[in-house]
Amino acid sequence: MKNRMTTLRIIAGKWRSRLIRFPAAPDLRPTPDRVRETLFNWLGQDLTGQHTLEPYAGSGALSFEALSRGAAHAVLWDQNKEVVATLKNTARTLDTAQAEIRQADALAALSEERRRFDLIFLDPPFARDDWAFLLPTCAALLNEGGFLYVEASRFIEAYPPELTRLKQGRAGVAHFGLYKRAQK
């Protein structure tokens, strides 16, 4: 039996107020509107030309929000087959070819990824504790001056030296922070 579907809205940009659907799957915890609004205020409203990665895509809200605000390309991965099918359907509904969506285990895919990104949205299931691998691996995939958004069940205090924490916040059980990769 398929999971029931739920929705959330895109906050700003060309798809402002459009609803996106996602399955109510276990461990799928979409970033709330208030947190997304805070994040995109931190980043600036215009993401024109940026390339993003969301290794634990879930609802895809962060990537679709970035595309709505002008990002050139968004890579979304998720391990759940139904979630991936829903993400692909969302991309079709929004009529975007800029979303590259595939079913993948985030840890394995991150190990194999060679492209560089301007912005990575890192929001693994709260039960996971792979930070010792995730943070340096994602930092290495960022362009100089690129941003890493982290959402977790606790504040992440230990992060690689090439990252500088710019901002942090908390909403309910979610702790979130924005990091920037140093420029040489």
Image (cartoon, helix red, strand yellow):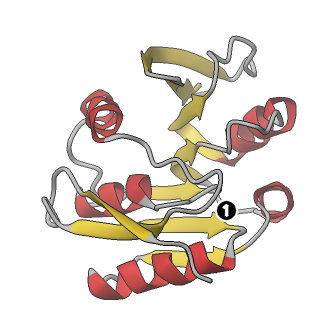
Say whether residue 93 is visible: yes
Q: Image quadrant for the C terminus?
A: top right
- Residue 20 in the image: state x and y as whole percent: 31, 68
Is residue 71 left or right of 23 when viewed as pictured? Answer: left
In percent of the image, x 47 and y 72: which residue is there? 4
Q: Quadrant of residue 97?
A: bottom left
Residue 176, horizontal then vertical, whole percent? 50, 25
**Left or right: 133, with 41 as reference point:** right
The picture quadrant where one finds residue 48 is bottom left
Q: Which residue is mark 1?
A: 115
Q: Is residue 127 left or right of residue 169?
A: right
Q: Residue at x 24, y 31 (%)?
A: 41
Query: In the figure, residue 75 lies in which quadrant?
Result: bottom right
Question: Is residue 71 visible in this depiction of the protein?
Answer: no
Question: Residue 154, relative to residue 87: is it above or below?
Answer: above
Tell me if residue 153 comes above or below residue 140 in the rendering.
above
Residue depicted at x 53% and y 45%: 121
Q: Residue furthest front?
A: 1
What amino acid type is highlighted by mark number 1?
Answer: Arg
For image coordinates 53% across by 27% down, the residue present is 180
Q: Quadrant of the N terminus?
A: bottom right
For the residue pair 133 and 34, the one nearer the viewer reads as: 34
Residue 62: image location, x then y, percent? 41, 52
- From the viewer's side, name the closer residue of 115 and 166: 166
In the image as oriented, which residue stretches furthest toward the top?
A: 157
The residue carrying pointer 1 sits among few (fewer than 14), some (14 to 19) or many (20 or more) residues within 10 Å by Cα, namely few
